[in-house]
Amino acid sequence: MSYKEIVEICGAKPTNTTVDGTHYDSTKIYLKTSFYDDGLGYATVEYKWGDHKNYATIEPYLKVAKETSQPFMAEVERETVTTGSRTIVIVLSVKPIDFKQVQK
């Protein structure tokens, strides 16, 4: 089952390389996440989001956010999946929110 929420994207990193004959192709995004229980403030949490091509869809927003010191807000759809022994949260989609909407 997936769920959507509006979150701040703090960064992203594409990978498209081959090392020792193994090809790696992914995008990781870093979302601002509040601490649970005793923690105060926020941390960034890394999530997998498909291949390196996904990065290009949000790169312009990341650049504007960095240049203007604005937060980059997006609707992110995530899903919790399992390997049978581990639980993993993966990102299914990212829909940037126009910066004008963020400023309202």
Image: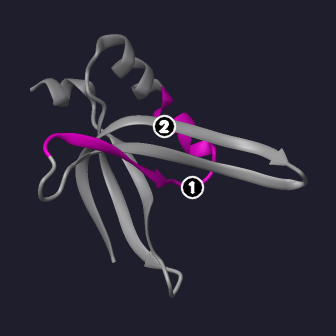
Q: Residues within 10 Å of mark 1 (few under 14, many from 20)?
A: some
Image position, residue 71 (x, y; %): 26, 27
The residues bearing labels 2 and 1 have C-alpha atoms spaced at a distance of 12 Å
> In the displayed structure, would residue 11 be above or below residue 94?
above
Q: Nearer the viewer, residue 102 or 11?
A: 11
Q: Secondary structure at mark 1?
A: loop
User: Which three-letter amino acid code belongs to the residue tagged 1?
Assistant: Gly
Q: Nearer the viewer, residue 15 or 84?
A: 84
- Whether tag 2 and tag 1 are in contact, CB under 8 A, the answer is no
Image position, residue 25 (x, y; %): 69, 50
Image position, residue 5 (x, y; %): 23, 55
Q: Residues within 10 Å of mark 2 (few under 14, many from 20)?
A: some
Question: Which image quadrant: the C terminus?
Answer: top left
> Which picture quadrant has residue 16?
top right
Residue pointed to by mark 1: 50
* Residue 100 painted magenta: no
Q: Residue at x 37, y 12 (%)?
A: 67
Q: Nearer the viewer, mark 2 or mark 1?
A: 2
Would residue 39 appear left or right of 56 to someone viewing this image? left
Image position, residue 32 (x, y; %): 28, 42
Q: Residue at x 42, y 27 (%)?
A: 62
Q: Which residues are magenta?
A: 40-59
Q: Nearer the viewer, residue 71 or 83?
A: 83
Decide which of tag 2 and tag 1 comes sooner along the chain.
2
Q: Secondary structure at mark 2?
A: strand
User: Which three-letter amino acid code belongs to the residue tagged 2?
Assistant: Ala
Question: Which image quadrant: the N terminus?
Answer: bottom left
Query: Residue 12: which disc?
Result: 2
